[in-house]
Image (cartoon, rainbow, N blue to C red):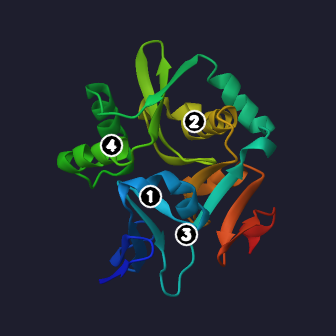
Amino acid sequence: MAFEFCFDKLYTVEIQEYPCLYFLDGRIAKFRTVFPRIDQMIDYRKFMGEGFCRDTFVFFKPICEGCSACIPMRIEVDKFCPSKSQKRVLKKNKDIKITVKRAGLPTPDDEVLYAKYNKLRHPERNKDEYLQGIFNLHMGYPYSYEMRFYIEDRLIGVSILDESMESISSAYFYWDPDFEDRSLGVYSMIQEIFYAKLSNKKYLYLGFYIRDISNMEYKSRFRPAQLYINSEWVDFYPDFDKL
């Protein structure tokens, strides 16, 4: 673990190493982690534009030696048009009601939903990790919003969206496994793109795209998109996944 202090930018940079969360083969992930001042967090777009993601109140990006699988991804919202399959997902979920509000303390319904989701996706986590995780999602960034999805009065999904001057970042989405057949991950992302467009934003950032992780495959179906490769944003061209 290494530290540096950037006097010209007034934030601390830390190099951290952890077992990789995506490839469970023993490899170690290495991250450049930035701890900004609270007044610098409004300039989220600069961090996003350099390929960082957010976790609680810090920004990070992988700098793993010998591995470049985690690729930041973003959608140009003005150019997006739903595909035929995405239109079918919209039609399937036309009974869903959506609300958007500033993020705040997670509600009891949020906690129940998040625990249910984690039991499916992350069964290794315990209750304390659930509670800390949902608190960090809802409270980690001062300009976050909650996009909440309901069928009648039942909460079935929550998207956490981080807003900056020209973009929105899709920080996290958790949903009710009872509705797995509705493709809620695809549906929520379409609605996030629509919301970003209504908010006059240029980009929706999607976090990392990892070609070899099956549950990220759906991101590749959102076009036109850009990937952050070799320190620049390039178009996600059709044959990328074949390389």
Q: Position of residue 5 (x, y in %)?
A: 35, 79
As measured in the structure, the alpha-carbon distance from the residue carrying label 2 to the one carrying label 1 is: 29 Å
- Compared to 209, does 4 lie above or below? below
User: Which sits earlier in the primary sequence, circle 4 or circle 3?
Assistant: 3
- Which residue position is annotated with label 3? 70
Residue at the far top in the pictured view: 152
Amino acid under disc 1: Gln
Mark 3 surroundings: few (<14), some (14-19) or many (≥20) residues within 10 A: many
As measured in the structure, the alpha-carbon distance from the residue carrying label 4 to the one carrying label 3 is: 25 Å
Residue 139 disc label = 4
User: Which sits earlier in the primary sequence, circle 2 or circle 1?
Assistant: 1
Q: Quadrant of the C terminus?
A: bottom right
Q: Position of residue 169 (x, y in %)?
A: 55, 49
Mark 4 surroundings: few (<14), some (14-19) or many (≥20) residues within 10 A: some
SS for dot 2: helix
Amino acid under disc 4: Met
- Which residue position is annotated with label 2? 188
Residue 40 disc label = 1
- Compared to 148, does 124 lie above or below? below
Give the mark toward the camera: 2 or 1. Answer: 1
Question: Are the residues tagged 4 and 1 within 8 Å (C-beta)?
Answer: no
Residue 22 can be seen, yes or no: no
Residue at 57% from the left image edge and 62% from the top image edge: 46
Q: Is residue 54 left or right of residue 118?
A: right
Mark count: 4
As measured in the structure, the alpha-carbon distance from the residue carrying label 4 to the one carrying label 1 is: 17 Å
Q: Is residue 214 left or right of residue 8?
A: right
SS for dot 1: helix
Query: Which image quadrant for residue 15?
Result: bottom left
Give the mark toward the camera: 1 or 3. Answer: 1
Residue at the far bottom in the pictured view: 66
